[in-house]
Amino acid sequence: MAWSSVLKNILTIDLEDWFHANYEKDIIENGKNYESRVEGNSIKILEYLSKYNAKATFFVLGSVAEKHPDLINRIAHAGHEIASHGFGHQLVYLQSEEEFREDLKNAVEAVKNAAGIQVRGYRAPSWSITEKSLWAWDIIQELGFSYDASIFPVKNFMYGMPDAPRFAFKPEHNKKKYDFIEIPTSTLRIGSFNIPFSGGFYFRILPYTIIKFCIKMLNKEEKPAIVYLHPREIDPKQPRIKLSFLNSFIHYWGIKNCEKKFQKLLKDFSFTSIIDYYEPEMNKHEEIQYSRI
């Protein structure tokens, strides 16, 4: 019997194309010259979700919604949640407040035009809400989002807030309390360290037995694992961008076997969307506590 009989976990898909990356600044700007592969990869993901009766939250780039409105409609009609991933996959902490506000407004409008949906959730590209961009929370609240899923409680060269809470909380910063829920990406606590495992590079590099163990440990604490995947990660035939050795390793390692691992994940665990899981807590303000950042 699958462990999912005990607790539903949460699956999130960062809906972007294979060339959307923030390692080197010219990649996205040159993206218009690349072949788009997001539609085919996303349809394959949808087929797996249907096969295993799983639901997910798709964090959609506004630029993808503009180019592939039929894809966004198909995802929505399949019963999955549509949320925002910004418009152009620009790092939040490299934008001004006004640039971020316009990017997010444009992203929401693009999704609304594509599928007639008012999004309730947001995830920053590359987890780029960090200590130096917490001003973004003001704009997220201003625009009426129900939740943000941009915090990764680890630290690496690009992102992370290792001292942030590991589980859902309401943010409090500079004596201001926010109404939306912050939903961090899952980590496993070992000693005084948070260990990432739940998606992207970490999902690709770790053996599946370790990923399965980490999810089970969270479920034993009665916490859902929040897993994330990019469509390109099940596409070993995607073109290769010329990157530095480190960035190439991060971007491409483990892609050959990722699709099989994803299928195992869907077989072993039950998944739902963020909004379906947290909707009751959003309506019960006492259930999720404030945490000062």
Image: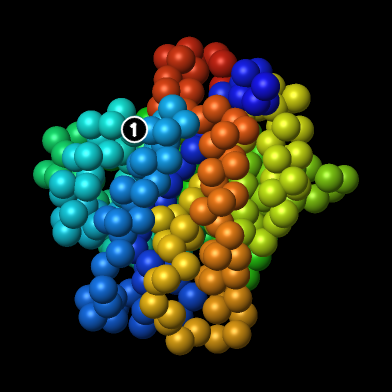
Q: For the C terminus, give its image quadrant.
A: top right
Image-based side of 218 in relation to 80, left or right? right
Q: Residue furthest right?
A: 191
- Amino acid carrying label 1: it is His
- Helix, strand or loop under label 1: loop
Residue 165, placed above or below residue 30: above
- Residue 145, image quadrant: top left
How did the renderer colour the structure? rainbow
**Residue position for label 1:** 80
Residue 224, placed above or below residue 174: above
- Residue 288, image quadrant: top right
Residue drawn at x 83%, y 45% as measured from the top left: 190
Which percent across, then down, holds residue 183?
Answer: 53, 37
Camera-nearest residue between 23 and 164? 23
Looking at the image, can residue 134 be seen? no
Which percent across, then down, holds residue 234?
Answer: 47, 58
Total tally of numbered discs in the picture: 1
Say few, some or many: other residues with alpha carbon within 10 Å of mark 1 (under 14 / 14 to 19 / 20 or more).
Answer: many
Image-based side of 184 in relation to 40, left or right? right
Which percent across, then down, holds residue 85?
Answer: 35, 51
- Residue 67, image quadrant: bottom left
Q: For the N terminus, give its image quadrant.
A: top right
Looking at the image, can residue 280 be seen? yes
Residue drawn at x 55%, y 86% as measured from the top left: 244
Residue drawn at x 42%, y 71% as measured from the top left: 237
